[in-house]
Amino acid sequence: MARALDVLKRILGAGAAINLADSDGYSPLLLSGHFGAPEFMSVLLDASAEVDQRADNGWTPLAQAASDGRLRCVELLVGAGAALDCGGLANAAGNGHGGCVKLLLAAGAGADCLDPGGQTSALWKAAKDGHLECVQLLLASGADAGLAVIKMSGDTDPIRGPGGGEGTTPFFMACQNGHLECAQLLLEAGAPVDKLRDFDGFSPLLIALCNSNRDCARLCVRAGADVNRVVRGGVTPLLVACQLGLLDACQLLSAFGASRAATPLGTPDQCAVHHKRADVAAWLAASRGPKWTHYVRNGAQVKSWLPLQHLEAHGVDLEKPRLTGRDLVLSSPCRRSPSSGRGRCCEAATTRSPASHRLSSGRASSARGASRIRPLRPSVPQSRSALSSRGPRSTARSASSSPQTLRRPASACAW
């Protein structure tokens, strides 16, 4: 180290260009901060190196040193008069360097300063990655919890308070990434729960549900978030919760008045059934009232992907006393059992789509004459080789030992 410092001093004494940058625009002063070499930085500063020289990416030596958490280098640069609005505070907060954040705030850096590119604030970056200490320091220094930046359109002017514009807030980012403690601090500091949204229209509640962050979603709902916000052609919080199978979130949203009305994407019941969320589908059906609870408890096959609302829409008599599982049988096309010779139905809760199931009554052998539900979507046909791999089929009427190929029943729905 001492030898390298001696070489540096000799080079500078011989008249070397102290601010000469490399191909990326990095000056010797910036590189000394990047690699955490305060001894070299001190020599360069004593030789009058330009303290705010920017690289090609717009970063100054202070922005680089703060981003890397080089506390001693940050102290030297601040002492040499480096500009504090260079984005160093945002870089330090985004990487969780609490010591650098504290030093820069004490030196007079604005708590709401943006990063070197002018896109995001220090608080936004700290909340995004869940750096709780940095969030606390920034809020204690007066950072605006409701500040967002429109970066997609090129407009870097911040939106403050309940302006109702587009742009992700620190609270939005904390909910998106599941940083509950940061989200709680931001709410206590006055962060808007619903006024600002991202560029797709998603609110903090919606983005928390999309990422299965139940605790953050619960925080949003209890803080007054709109549980019926509709975005992107029909997406609602309840639909997202049903699709992902978040039963506790469905119950919470319903308790706070979430609507079950149909959107262009369907109803919550249809969404839960389509994505095979058995517990959610059963709860949605049972929570409709005593009548629906009776159907579910008496074998209405909710866990076998029978959409009760779909059956009712297609004229199935749901008022029949003591509706049981035998009265409603969801089956794939029948095949004969080699041992008993009787028809056997496959359970619906396998790889089949709920839309491809048909309704039959009695034994599966009477499937030809039974009524069936028109599928909502065509199911994927099985290959002929897959059908033949099911093995030989024997009947009681024929004693032939040669295997018979399984054929598609004429009246069966799409396989």
Image: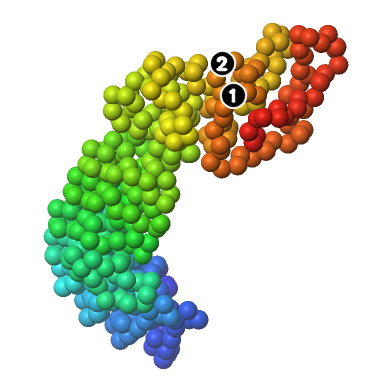
Q: Nearer the viewer, residue 68 or 120?
A: 120
Residue 49 at what x, y percent from top left? 33, 84
Which residue is rendered at x = 69% and y = 14% of the image? 337
Q: Label 1 belongs to which residue?
A: 370
Residue 259 at what x, y percent from top left? 29, 44
Residue 187 at what x, y percent from top left? 18, 53
**Left or right: 326, with 207 as reference point:** right
Residue 279 at what x, y percent from top left? 39, 29
Q: Residue furthest bottom?
A: 15
Q: Quadrant of the N terminus?
A: bottom left
Which residue is rendered at x = 81% and y = 11% of the image? 398
Q: Residues within 10 Å of mark 2 (few under 14, many from 20)?
A: few
Dots 2, 1 in contact, CB < 8 A: yes
| Residue 362: image tag | 2
Indicate the amino acid at tag 2: Gly
| Residue 234: image tag | none
Which residue is rendered at x = 63% and y = 18% of the image? 366
Residue 239 location, quadrant: top left
Q: Secondary structure at mark 1?
A: loop
**Left or right: 230, with 357 as reference point:** left
Q: Nearer the viewer, residue 361 or 133?
A: 361
* Residue 66 is at least partly visible in this image: no
Q: Nearer the viewer, residue 177 or 30?
A: 177
Q: Secondary structure at mark 2?
A: loop
Indicate the amino acid at tag 1: Ala
Residue 385 location, quadrant: top right
**Left or right: 410, with 289 as reference point:** right
Q: Does 318 appear above or below 16?
A: above
Q: Quadrant of the C terminus?
A: top right
Q: Residues within 10 Å of mark 1 (few under 14, many from 20)?
A: some
Which residue is rendered at x = 46% and y = 31% of the image? 315
